Amino acid sequence: SAPSYLVGLIGAGVGPSLSPPMHEREAAVSGRRLIYRTIDITDLELPAESVAELVPAARRLGFNGLNITHPCKRLVLPVLDRLTPDAAAIGAVNTVVFDDGAAIGHNTDWSGFARSLERGLPHAHRDRVVLLGAGGAGAAVAYALLMSGVRTLVVADLDADRAAELAEWVGGRFPDTRCESADAADPGRLLAGADGLVHATPVGMAHHPGTPVPPELLRPPLWVADVVYRPLRTELLTSAEERGCATLDGGGMAVFQAADAFELFTGRTADRDRMLAHFHEL
Ligand code: NAD
């Protein structure tokens, strides 16, 4: 019979995640059986650190792999046997594959974002790009931007130390690139001379409404990408579009990180256009 797969997602508040239907449907349409379970540490009343027990337990219970999300992407590192070079450079893991008894940590957030950027804004100038938000998503996006040929990356975050640490950490891996941090409280100065803005803070999410940048600062040729995908049309993207900027929503990153994880879990090629169409139906 065809192989079957058991995978899961560990994180806080993951009940409404779209990952189960995305993975299960992609498996089903290609004639495979895949069950994707959420393991919600909020519902289980477990601390974030419990990921260190849940991952080995899932391995013993026969899971093929796991996705890991907020707030466990860094806390999972010590219980993994190996990291891919990308995951090591980013310092965070969103996908764990159990392979011959070893737990291997991957990061498909960066590859998902890189693919989304390449597909959605293929001609975008990338000399100077501003990244707002230096948390989990921001770290993966910073790596993706540097891998995608950005020459100067400027990282800003309300937490200035976090921005400086990320710029130094990820910039250290790309010696031919400039990577600096700047003051998030002065968006006018931050965006002066930038080709693109990538937003990776929670501002604009349904429970966190608003826009991180005054709309009057958004004007072509600046392009604007958001990683927030609930909703897809954030206030930031709506204002940017109204002012004529090219934009990219967070849906592509969400779908392509899942497609890359699906391929790691199953060893099979994912149909990314089909997954994207399905995501838009969910
Ligand atoms: P996080 O908590 O790890 O990091 C958020 C960072 O934003 C923090 O460093 C915080 O200090 C900073 N911040 C908050 N408000 C700010 C503001 N007004 N100005 C500047 N900095 C500010 O969160 P995360 O896991 O990185 O998630 C961030 C967003 O990315 C969430 O909306 C999440 O849903 C989204 N996300 C999307 C994808 C995707 O696939 N599209 C993947 C991961 C995360």
Image (spheres, grey):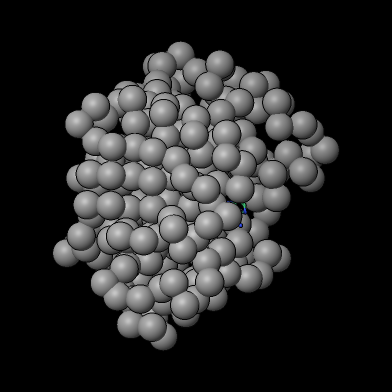
> Where is residue 54 drawn, in percent x and y?
66, 27
Observer-nearest of 148 and 27:
148
Q: Residue at x 61, y 42 (%)?
A: 159
Residue projecting furthest to the right? 45
Relative image position of residue 73 (x, y in whole percent): 55, 33
Is 255 or 32 nearer to us in this picture? 255
**Residue 168 coordinates in the image, percent (x, y):** 41, 29
| x, y percent for residue 181 | 44, 40
Residue 74 left/right relative to 108: right
Location of residue 210 with respect to 33 vertically, above or below = below
Tell me where residue 237 sits by quadrant. Answer: bottom left
**Which residue in the rendered view is the most extreme toward the bottom?**
242
Q: Nearer the viewer, residue 16 or 4?
A: 16
Residue 191 shows in this picture: yes
Quarter of the image for the N terminus: give it. top left
Residue drawn at point x = 56 percent, y = 17 percent: 79
Front-most of residues 124 and 74: 124
Above or below — where is 228 with respect to 261?
below
Horizontal placement of 205 versus 81: left or right? right
Residue furthest toward the left? 123
Q: Is residue 152 left or right of residue 198?
A: left
Residue at 35% in and 71% down? 247
Q: How many marks?
A: 0
Residue 69 lies in quadrant: top right
- Residue 97 seen from this side: no
Q: Residue at x 32, y 67 (%)?
A: 223
